Image: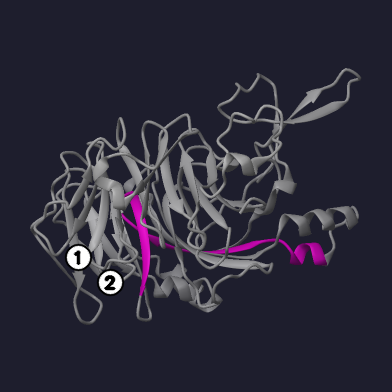
Amino acid sequence: MAAPGEDACTAGDGETEEMDEAGSDDNDMEDEGVDGEVESKVYVPGLEPLQPGVELEMDQSAYRMYHECQTGAPCLSFDIVRDEDGGNREQFPLSLLLCAGTQADTALSNRLLVMRMHNLHGTGEVKEDEKESSDEESDEDEDKKPQMELAMMPHYGGINRVRVTRRGQQSLAAVWSEKGQVEIFDLQPQLEAVHNSDAMAALIQQQKEASPLFSFSGHMTEGFAIDWSPKVPGRLVSGDCKKNIHVWEPREGGTSWQIDQRPFSSHSKSVEDLQWSPTEATVFASCSVDQSIRVWDIRAPPNSMLSANEAHSSDVNVISWNSSEPFLLSGGDDGLLKVWDLRQFKSGRPVANFKQHSAPVTSVEWNPVDSSVFAASGADDVVSQWDLSVESCDVGARAEGVKDLPPQLLFLHQGQTEVKEIHWHPQMPGVLISTALSGFNLFRTISV
Protein backbone atom coordinates (compact mmCIF):
# COMPACT_ATOMS: atom_id res chain seq x y z
CA MET A 1 0.00 0.00 0.00
CA ALA A 2 1.20 3.52 -0.67
CA ALA A 3 2.78 5.00 2.42
CA PRO A 4 1.53 8.42 3.56
CA GLY A 5 2.60 10.98 1.00
CA GLU A 6 3.12 8.50 -1.83
CA ASP A 7 0.99 8.57 -4.96
CA ALA A 8 -1.12 5.52 -5.64
CA CYS A 9 -1.47 4.41 -9.24
CA THR A 10 -4.38 6.05 -11.04
CA ALA A 11 -5.29 4.38 -14.30
CA GLY A 12 -6.28 6.24 -17.44
CA ASP A 13 -8.30 4.84 -20.34
CA GLY A 14 -6.43 1.85 -21.71
CA GLU A 15 -3.03 2.84 -20.36
CA THR A 16 -0.45 0.52 -18.84
CA GLU A 17 0.05 1.51 -15.24
CA GLU A 18 2.47 0.64 -12.49
CA MET A 19 0.73 -0.63 -9.38
CA ASP A 20 1.91 0.11 -5.86
CA GLU A 21 3.76 -2.62 -4.03
CA ALA A 22 3.75 -3.33 -0.31
CA GLY A 23 4.25 -0.26 1.86
CA SER A 24 2.44 0.89 4.98
CA ASP A 25 -0.69 -0.58 6.50
CA ASP A 26 -2.58 -0.60 9.78
CA ASN A 27 -1.04 -3.58 11.54
CA ASP A 28 1.61 -2.46 14.01
CA MET A 29 1.89 0.74 16.01
CA GLU A 30 4.96 2.19 17.62
CA ASP A 31 5.48 3.34 21.22
CA GLU A 32 8.50 5.09 22.68
CA GLY A 33 10.17 3.04 25.43
CA VAL A 34 11.87 4.29 28.59
CA ASP A 35 15.20 4.82 26.85
CA GLY A 36 13.65 6.63 23.91
CA GLU A 37 13.72 3.52 21.76
CA VAL A 38 10.77 2.82 19.53
CA GLU A 39 8.85 -0.28 20.56
CA SER A 40 6.31 -2.01 18.34
CA LYS A 41 3.10 -3.57 19.50
CA VAL A 42 0.15 -5.08 17.74
CA TYR A 43 -2.90 -2.87 17.30
CA VAL A 44 -6.18 -4.77 17.27
CA PRO A 45 -9.19 -2.76 16.07
CA GLY A 46 -12.15 -2.93 18.39
CA LEU A 47 -10.17 -3.85 21.49
CA GLU A 48 -8.71 -0.42 22.16
CA PRO A 49 -9.08 3.08 20.73
CA LEU A 50 -6.28 4.39 18.54
CA GLN A 51 -4.58 7.21 20.44
CA PRO A 52 -4.21 10.61 18.71
CA GLY A 53 -0.90 10.98 16.88
CA VAL A 54 -0.15 7.26 16.82
CA GLU A 55 0.91 6.04 13.40
CA LEU A 56 0.15 2.54 12.17
CA GLU A 57 2.70 0.66 10.12
CA MET A 58 2.32 -2.51 8.09
CA ASP A 59 4.17 -5.62 9.19
CA GLN A 60 5.31 -6.95 5.81
CA SER A 61 6.21 -10.30 7.32
CA ALA A 62 2.47 -10.95 7.84
CA TYR A 63 1.87 -10.96 4.05
CA ARG A 64 3.07 -13.25 1.30
CA MET A 65 1.87 -10.73 -1.29
CA TYR A 66 0.49 -7.20 -1.07
CA HIS A 67 -0.36 -4.72 -3.83
CA GLU A 68 -2.83 -1.87 -4.20
CA CYS A 69 -4.17 0.17 -7.10
CA GLN A 70 -6.73 2.82 -7.96
CA THR A 71 -9.01 3.27 -10.96
CA GLY A 72 -10.13 6.89 -10.61
CA ALA A 73 -13.79 6.78 -9.58
CA PRO A 74 -14.38 4.15 -6.88
CA CYS A 75 -15.54 0.66 -7.89
CA LEU A 76 -17.96 -0.56 -5.23
CA SER A 77 -18.42 -3.95 -6.89
CA PHE A 78 -16.20 -6.26 -8.94
CA ASP A 79 -15.79 -9.88 -9.92
CA ILE A 80 -12.92 -12.11 -10.97
CA VAL A 81 -12.69 -13.18 -14.60
CA ARG A 82 -11.32 -16.71 -14.83
CA ASP A 83 -8.42 -16.98 -17.26
CA GLU A 84 -7.03 -19.98 -19.11
CA ASP A 85 -3.78 -20.29 -17.14
CA GLY A 86 -5.12 -23.07 -14.92
CA GLY A 87 -5.71 -23.24 -11.17
CA ASN A 88 -3.67 -23.61 -7.98
CA ARG A 89 -1.16 -20.98 -9.13
CA GLU A 90 1.19 -20.01 -6.31
CA GLN A 91 4.41 -19.31 -8.23
CA PHE A 92 5.33 -15.61 -8.48
CA PRO A 93 4.91 -13.50 -10.49
CA LEU A 94 1.13 -13.85 -10.66
CA SER A 95 -1.42 -12.32 -13.03
CA LEU A 96 -5.20 -11.94 -12.83
CA LEU A 97 -8.23 -10.42 -14.55
CA LEU A 98 -11.01 -8.39 -12.89
CA CYS A 99 -14.25 -6.80 -14.09
CA ALA A 100 -15.57 -3.84 -12.11
CA GLY A 101 -18.04 -0.97 -12.33
CA THR A 102 -17.67 2.59 -11.11
CA GLN A 103 -19.92 4.85 -9.07
CA ALA A 104 -18.76 8.26 -10.27
CA ASP A 105 -20.03 11.72 -9.30
CA THR A 106 -22.18 12.00 -12.45
CA ALA A 107 -24.10 9.35 -14.41
CA LEU A 108 -22.16 10.13 -17.61
CA SER A 109 -18.77 9.62 -15.94
CA ASN A 110 -19.24 5.93 -15.11
CA ARG A 111 -17.29 3.07 -16.67
CA LEU A 112 -17.46 -0.70 -16.89
CA LEU A 113 -13.84 -1.85 -16.51
CA VAL A 114 -11.78 -4.90 -17.37
CA MET A 115 -8.40 -4.96 -15.61
CA ARG A 116 -5.39 -7.15 -16.20
CA MET A 117 -2.96 -7.02 -13.29
CA HIS A 118 0.31 -8.87 -13.84
CA ASN A 119 3.93 -9.17 -12.75
CA LEU A 120 2.69 -9.44 -9.16
CA HIS A 121 5.60 -10.45 -6.91
CA GLY A 122 5.56 -11.51 -3.29
CA THR A 123 6.46 -9.25 -0.36
CA GLY A 124 9.38 -11.53 0.55
CA GLU A 125 10.93 -10.98 -2.89
CA VAL A 126 10.53 -7.22 -2.56
CA LYS A 127 12.16 -7.26 0.88
CA GLU A 128 15.21 -9.18 -0.34
CA ASP A 129 15.61 -6.80 -3.28
CA GLU A 130 15.53 -3.82 -0.94
CA LYS A 131 18.38 -5.28 1.12
CA GLU A 132 20.58 -5.71 -1.93
CA SER A 133 19.60 -2.63 -3.95
CA SER A 134 21.83 0.41 -4.29
CA ASP A 135 20.72 4.04 -4.43
CA GLU A 136 19.99 3.65 -8.12
CA GLU A 137 17.23 1.28 -9.11
CA SER A 138 18.53 -1.58 -11.25
CA ASP A 139 16.88 -2.91 -14.38
CA GLU A 140 16.01 -6.01 -12.37
CA ASP A 141 14.06 -3.90 -9.87
CA GLU A 142 12.21 -2.24 -12.74
CA ASP A 143 11.33 -5.69 -14.11
CA LYS A 144 9.68 -6.59 -10.80
CA LYS A 145 7.26 -3.65 -10.75
CA PRO A 146 3.61 -4.77 -10.99
CA GLN A 147 1.69 -3.66 -14.06
CA MET A 148 -1.95 -3.07 -14.98
CA GLU A 149 -3.79 -2.75 -18.29
CA LEU A 150 -7.24 -1.21 -18.07
CA ALA A 151 -9.97 -1.34 -20.74
CA MET A 152 -12.88 1.03 -20.06
CA MET A 153 -16.38 1.19 -21.54
CA PRO A 154 -18.51 4.28 -20.86
CA HIS A 155 -21.66 3.28 -18.98
CA TYR A 156 -24.51 5.68 -18.26
CA GLY A 157 -25.41 5.37 -14.59
CA GLY A 158 -23.57 4.14 -11.49
CA ILE A 159 -22.96 0.39 -11.30
CA ASN A 160 -24.33 -1.22 -8.14
CA ARG A 161 -23.03 -4.76 -8.64
CA VAL A 162 -21.11 -6.82 -11.19
CA ARG A 163 -21.03 -10.61 -11.56
CA VAL A 164 -19.11 -12.53 -14.26
CA THR A 165 -19.54 -16.02 -15.71
CA ARG A 166 -18.25 -18.15 -18.59
CA ARG A 167 -20.76 -19.52 -21.10
CA GLY A 168 -18.95 -21.50 -23.75
CA GLN A 169 -16.26 -19.18 -25.10
CA GLN A 170 -18.03 -16.06 -23.80
CA SER A 171 -17.15 -14.14 -20.65
CA LEU A 172 -20.39 -12.43 -19.63
CA ALA A 173 -20.86 -9.66 -17.08
CA ALA A 174 -24.26 -9.10 -15.42
CA VAL A 175 -24.56 -5.50 -14.25
CA TRP A 176 -27.11 -3.99 -11.84
CA SER A 177 -27.15 -0.22 -12.34
CA GLU A 178 -28.84 2.74 -10.71
CA LYS A 179 -30.91 3.07 -13.90
CA GLY A 180 -33.08 0.24 -12.56
CA GLN A 181 -31.90 -2.14 -15.28
CA VAL A 182 -29.98 -5.39 -15.29
CA GLU A 183 -27.73 -5.61 -18.35
CA ILE A 184 -25.60 -8.41 -19.81
CA PHE A 185 -22.31 -7.52 -21.52
CA ASP A 186 -19.93 -9.63 -23.60
CA LEU A 187 -16.42 -8.81 -22.30
CA GLN A 188 -14.53 -10.21 -25.30
CA PRO A 189 -13.43 -6.83 -26.81
CA GLN A 190 -12.14 -5.64 -23.44
CA LEU A 191 -10.34 -8.93 -22.70
CA GLU A 192 -8.62 -8.73 -26.09
CA ALA A 193 -7.63 -5.12 -25.41
CA VAL A 194 -5.88 -5.82 -22.10
CA HIS A 195 -3.77 -8.51 -23.81
CA ASN A 196 -3.06 -6.74 -27.13
CA SER A 197 -1.88 -3.15 -27.67
CA ASP A 198 -3.45 -2.85 -31.15
CA ALA A 199 -6.84 -4.00 -29.81
CA MET A 200 -6.45 -1.51 -26.93
CA ALA A 201 -5.72 1.34 -29.33
CA ALA A 202 -8.83 0.48 -31.37
CA LEU A 203 -10.97 0.33 -28.25
CA ILE A 204 -9.72 3.72 -27.03
CA GLN A 205 -10.40 5.27 -30.43
CA GLN A 206 -14.02 4.08 -30.39
CA GLN A 207 -14.86 5.34 -26.89
CA LYS A 208 -18.50 4.48 -27.42
CA GLU A 209 -20.94 3.66 -24.65
CA ALA A 210 -21.07 0.02 -23.61
CA SER A 211 -23.71 -1.80 -25.64
CA PRO A 212 -25.36 -4.69 -23.76
CA LEU A 213 -26.18 -8.02 -25.35
CA PHE A 214 -29.43 -7.94 -23.39
CA SER A 215 -31.17 -5.76 -20.81
CA PHE A 216 -34.14 -6.18 -18.48
CA SER A 217 -36.21 -3.30 -17.09
CA GLY A 218 -38.92 -5.43 -15.46
CA HIS A 219 -37.73 -4.80 -11.92
CA MET A 220 -39.12 -1.22 -12.11
CA THR A 221 -36.54 -0.02 -9.58
CA GLU A 222 -32.84 -0.44 -8.90
CA GLY A 223 -31.26 -3.27 -6.94
CA PHE A 224 -28.03 -4.91 -5.81
CA ALA A 225 -28.67 -8.66 -5.63
CA ILE A 226 -27.53 -10.77 -8.58
CA ASP A 227 -25.84 -14.15 -9.13
CA TRP A 228 -24.97 -16.52 -12.00
CA SER A 229 -25.69 -20.22 -11.57
CA PRO A 230 -22.54 -22.36 -11.20
CA LYS A 231 -24.50 -25.41 -12.44
CA VAL A 232 -26.43 -24.13 -15.49
CA PRO A 233 -24.37 -21.85 -17.80
CA GLY A 234 -26.19 -18.58 -18.41
CA ARG A 235 -28.86 -19.01 -15.72
CA LEU A 236 -29.18 -15.85 -13.62
CA VAL A 237 -31.17 -14.57 -10.64
CA SER A 238 -31.67 -10.88 -9.80
CA GLY A 239 -33.39 -9.10 -6.91
CA ASP A 240 -34.42 -5.48 -6.37
CA CYS A 241 -35.09 -2.92 -3.66
CA LYS A 242 -38.85 -3.54 -3.86
CA LYS A 243 -38.47 -7.18 -2.69
CA ASN A 244 -38.96 -8.88 -6.08
CA ILE A 245 -36.69 -11.64 -7.44
CA HIS A 246 -36.60 -12.78 -11.09
CA VAL A 247 -34.99 -15.89 -12.57
CA TRP A 248 -33.42 -15.69 -16.04
CA GLU A 249 -33.17 -18.69 -18.36
CA PRO A 250 -30.74 -18.49 -21.31
CA ARG A 251 -32.07 -19.02 -24.81
CA GLU A 252 -30.24 -20.69 -27.67
CA GLY A 253 -27.53 -18.54 -29.21
CA GLY A 254 -26.29 -16.91 -26.00
CA THR A 255 -27.62 -13.41 -26.70
CA SER A 256 -31.07 -13.43 -25.06
CA TRP A 257 -32.83 -14.66 -21.93
CA GLN A 258 -36.34 -15.71 -20.96
CA ILE A 259 -37.37 -14.03 -17.69
CA ASP A 260 -40.35 -15.23 -15.71
CA GLN A 261 -42.55 -12.17 -15.15
CA ARG A 262 -43.97 -13.75 -12.01
CA PRO A 263 -41.47 -12.73 -9.30
CA PHE A 264 -40.41 -14.64 -6.22
CA SER A 265 -41.69 -12.22 -3.60
CA SER A 266 -41.84 -13.70 -0.10
CA HIS A 267 -39.58 -10.98 1.27
CA SER A 268 -41.32 -7.89 2.63
CA LYS A 269 -38.43 -5.46 2.01
CA SER A 270 -35.39 -4.94 -0.25
CA VAL A 271 -33.50 -8.04 -1.40
CA GLU A 272 -29.83 -7.37 -0.61
CA ASP A 273 -28.00 -10.47 -1.87
CA LEU A 274 -28.59 -13.72 -3.78
CA GLN A 275 -26.59 -16.94 -4.07
CA TRP A 276 -27.21 -20.06 -6.14
CA SER A 277 -26.59 -23.41 -4.50
CA PRO A 278 -23.24 -24.85 -5.66
CA THR A 279 -24.76 -28.36 -5.82
CA GLU A 280 -28.50 -28.02 -6.61
CA ALA A 281 -29.17 -26.43 -10.01
CA THR A 282 -32.66 -25.16 -9.11
CA VAL A 283 -32.01 -23.84 -5.59
CA PHE A 284 -30.90 -20.37 -4.51
CA ALA A 285 -30.79 -18.36 -1.27
CA SER A 286 -31.65 -14.71 -0.58
CA CYS A 287 -31.30 -12.22 2.24
CA SER A 288 -33.17 -9.00 2.91
CA VAL A 289 -33.62 -5.79 4.84
CA ASP A 290 -36.59 -7.62 6.45
CA GLN A 291 -33.94 -9.45 8.59
CA SER A 292 -34.62 -12.84 6.97
CA ILE A 293 -32.69 -15.40 4.93
CA ARG A 294 -34.72 -17.59 2.57
CA VAL A 295 -34.01 -20.65 0.43
CA TRP A 296 -35.97 -21.16 -2.80
CA ASP A 297 -36.51 -23.83 -5.46
CA ILE A 298 -37.45 -22.51 -8.90
CA ARG A 299 -39.46 -25.68 -9.63
CA ALA A 300 -41.87 -24.85 -6.79
CA PRO A 301 -44.44 -22.02 -6.61
CA PRO A 302 -42.79 -18.63 -6.01
CA ASN A 303 -42.61 -18.98 -2.24
CA SER A 304 -39.51 -19.82 -0.26
CA MET A 305 -38.96 -23.43 0.84
CA LEU A 306 -37.05 -22.59 4.00
CA SER A 307 -36.67 -19.39 5.96
CA ALA A 308 -34.97 -17.93 9.00
CA ASN A 309 -37.25 -14.97 9.68
CA GLU A 310 -35.12 -13.24 12.32
CA ALA A 311 -31.70 -14.28 11.07
CA HIS A 312 -30.18 -10.96 12.23
CA SER A 313 -31.48 -8.18 14.45
CA SER A 314 -31.38 -5.73 11.51
CA ASP A 315 -30.75 -5.76 7.73
CA VAL A 316 -29.09 -8.90 6.38
CA ASN A 317 -26.65 -7.50 3.83
CA VAL A 318 -24.71 -10.42 2.35
CA ILE A 319 -24.65 -14.21 2.13
CA SER A 320 -22.24 -16.85 0.81
CA TRP A 321 -22.93 -20.53 0.11
CA ASN A 322 -20.15 -22.99 0.99
CA SER A 323 -19.01 -24.84 -2.13
CA SER A 324 -18.62 -28.26 -0.48
CA GLU A 325 -20.53 -28.20 2.84
CA PRO A 326 -24.24 -27.45 3.56
CA PHE A 327 -23.33 -24.14 5.21
CA LEU A 328 -24.55 -20.62 4.49
CA LEU A 329 -22.65 -17.59 5.81
CA SER A 330 -24.39 -14.27 6.47
CA GLY A 331 -23.41 -10.76 7.53
CA GLY A 332 -25.69 -7.97 8.71
CA ASP A 333 -26.00 -4.35 9.75
CA ASP A 334 -25.60 -5.59 13.33
CA GLY A 335 -21.93 -6.38 12.57
CA LEU A 336 -22.52 -10.09 13.17
CA LEU A 337 -21.22 -12.98 11.10
CA LYS A 338 -23.39 -16.11 11.29
CA VAL A 339 -22.90 -19.62 9.95
CA TRP A 340 -26.05 -21.60 9.17
CA ASP A 341 -26.26 -25.38 8.75
CA LEU A 342 -28.96 -25.88 6.11
CA ARG A 343 -29.81 -29.27 7.63
CA GLN A 344 -30.93 -27.38 10.75
CA PHE A 345 -32.12 -24.21 9.05
CA LYS A 346 -35.73 -24.52 10.21
CA SER A 347 -34.57 -24.14 13.82
CA GLY A 348 -33.71 -20.52 13.08
CA ARG A 349 -30.47 -20.84 15.06
CA PRO A 350 -26.99 -20.48 13.53
CA VAL A 351 -24.29 -23.02 14.36
CA ALA A 352 -21.70 -20.24 14.80
CA ASN A 353 -21.98 -16.57 15.65
CA PHE A 354 -19.09 -14.05 15.60
CA LYS A 355 -19.00 -10.38 16.63
CA GLN A 356 -15.70 -8.86 15.59
CA HIS A 357 -16.72 -6.08 13.22
CA SER A 358 -17.85 -2.88 14.91
CA ALA A 359 -19.96 -1.69 11.95
CA PRO A 360 -22.22 -3.27 9.29
CA VAL A 361 -20.78 -6.24 7.41
CA THR A 362 -20.45 -5.35 3.70
CA SER A 363 -19.20 -8.61 2.13
CA VAL A 364 -18.65 -12.27 3.02
CA GLU A 365 -17.21 -15.18 1.06
CA TRP A 366 -16.14 -18.76 1.74
CA ASN A 367 -12.70 -19.78 0.53
CA PRO A 368 -13.27 -21.81 -2.68
CA VAL A 369 -10.64 -24.46 -1.85
CA ASP A 370 -10.86 -24.69 1.96
CA SER A 371 -14.40 -25.24 3.22
CA SER A 372 -13.59 -24.13 6.78
CA VAL A 373 -12.11 -20.73 5.85
CA PHE A 374 -14.02 -17.54 5.05
CA ALA A 375 -13.41 -13.80 4.82
CA ALA A 376 -15.58 -10.80 5.65
CA SER A 377 -15.39 -7.03 5.34
CA GLY A 378 -17.11 -4.28 7.29
CA ALA A 379 -17.87 -0.58 7.27
CA ASP A 380 -15.29 -0.41 10.09
CA ASP A 381 -12.59 -0.53 7.35
CA VAL A 382 -11.50 -4.04 8.34
CA VAL A 383 -11.21 -7.27 6.34
CA SER A 384 -11.24 -10.36 8.57
CA GLN A 385 -10.16 -13.93 7.82
CA TRP A 386 -11.56 -16.90 9.77
CA ASP A 387 -11.02 -20.65 10.09
CA LEU A 388 -13.85 -22.67 11.66
CA SER A 389 -11.60 -25.72 12.08
CA VAL A 390 -9.56 -23.94 14.77
CA GLU A 391 -10.54 -24.71 18.36
CA SER A 392 -9.51 -22.97 21.58
CA CYS A 393 -6.98 -25.68 22.44
CA ASP A 394 -5.23 -25.20 19.06
CA VAL A 395 -4.34 -21.57 19.61
CA GLY A 396 -1.62 -21.86 22.24
CA ALA A 397 0.13 -18.73 23.48
CA ARG A 398 -1.23 -15.52 22.01
CA ALA A 399 0.20 -12.03 21.99
CA GLU A 400 -0.56 -9.69 24.87
CA GLY A 401 -3.82 -7.84 24.26
CA VAL A 402 -5.30 -10.30 21.78
CA LYS A 403 -6.20 -13.15 24.11
CA ASP A 404 -9.86 -12.16 24.07
CA LEU A 405 -10.19 -12.61 20.31
CA PRO A 406 -12.13 -15.61 18.97
CA PRO A 407 -9.74 -18.51 18.31
CA GLN A 408 -11.21 -18.89 14.81
CA LEU A 409 -10.07 -15.37 13.84
CA LEU A 410 -6.94 -15.70 11.69
CA PHE A 411 -6.18 -12.19 10.49
CA LEU A 412 -7.39 -8.56 10.49
CA HIS A 413 -6.40 -6.58 7.41
CA GLN A 414 -6.68 -2.78 7.43
CA GLY A 415 -5.66 0.28 5.46
CA GLN A 416 -8.63 0.87 3.16
CA THR A 417 -11.50 3.34 3.54
CA GLU A 418 -15.06 1.96 3.34
CA VAL A 419 -14.42 -1.58 2.11
CA LYS A 420 -17.37 -2.65 -0.06
CA GLU A 421 -16.64 -6.09 -1.52
CA ILE A 422 -14.15 -8.96 -1.25
CA HIS A 423 -13.46 -12.06 -3.35
CA TRP A 424 -11.06 -14.98 -3.07
CA HIS A 425 -9.34 -15.76 -6.37
CA PRO A 426 -10.55 -19.22 -7.41
CA GLN A 427 -7.32 -20.04 -9.29
CA MET A 428 -4.79 -18.70 -6.75
CA PRO A 429 -5.07 -20.29 -3.29
CA GLY A 430 -5.20 -17.74 -0.48
CA VAL A 431 -5.24 -14.62 -2.69
CA LEU A 432 -7.93 -12.17 -1.55
CA ILE A 433 -9.00 -9.01 -3.40
CA SER A 434 -10.95 -6.15 -1.84
CA THR A 435 -12.39 -2.95 -3.22
CA ALA A 436 -13.14 0.24 -1.29
CA LEU A 437 -13.63 3.95 -1.80
CA SER A 438 -9.84 4.21 -1.54
CA GLY A 439 -9.16 1.62 -4.27
CA PHE A 440 -8.25 -2.06 -4.59
CA ASN A 441 -6.05 -4.27 -2.40
CA LEU A 442 -4.67 -7.61 -3.61
CA PHE A 443 -3.01 -9.68 -0.94
CA ARG A 444 -2.25 -13.07 0.55
CA THR A 445 -1.60 -13.35 4.25
CA ILE A 446 0.62 -15.89 6.00
CA SER A 447 -2.52 -17.27 7.66
CA VAL A 448 -4.19 -18.71 4.53
Sequence-earlier tag: 2 or 1: 2
**Going by the image, does 406 lie left or right of 25?**
left
Quarter of the figure with residue 87: bottom right
- Tag 2's secondary structure? loop
Q: Is residue 141 in the magenta section?
A: yes
Magenta region: which residues? 140-166
Crowd class of label 1 (few under 14; some 14 to 19; many from 20; radius 10 Å): some
Q: Which amino acid type is marked by label 2?
A: Gly
* Image: 190 above or below 330: below
Q: Residue at x 83, y 57 (%)?
A: 128
The residue lying furthest to the front in this view is 393
Is residue 251 depicted above or below 175 in this figure?
below
Of residue 21 and residue 11, the one placed in the foreground of this image is 21
201 sits left or right of 246 in the view: right
Instruction: Tell me how many marks there are.
Output: 2
- Residue 234 is tagged as 2
Query: Contact, CB < 8 Å: mark 2 with mark 1?
Result: yes
> For this view, does 437 lie left or right of residue 298?
right
Q: What type is the residue that disc 1 sits on?
A: Trp
The answer to whether residue 293 is seen in the rendering is no
Q: Nearer the viewer, residue 68 or 347?
A: 347
**Local SS, label 1:** strand
Give the residue displayed 74% in from the left and 48% down from the top.
Answer: 61
For residue 56, which quarter of the picture?
A: top right
Q: Position of residue 379 (x, y in %)?
A: 45, 35
Q: Position of residue 313 (x, y in %)?
A: 30, 30
Name the residue beneath numbered marker 1: 248
**What colour-coding does the image apply?**
one colour
Residue 185 among those drawn in magenta: no
Residue in front for this viewpoint, 32 or 284: 284
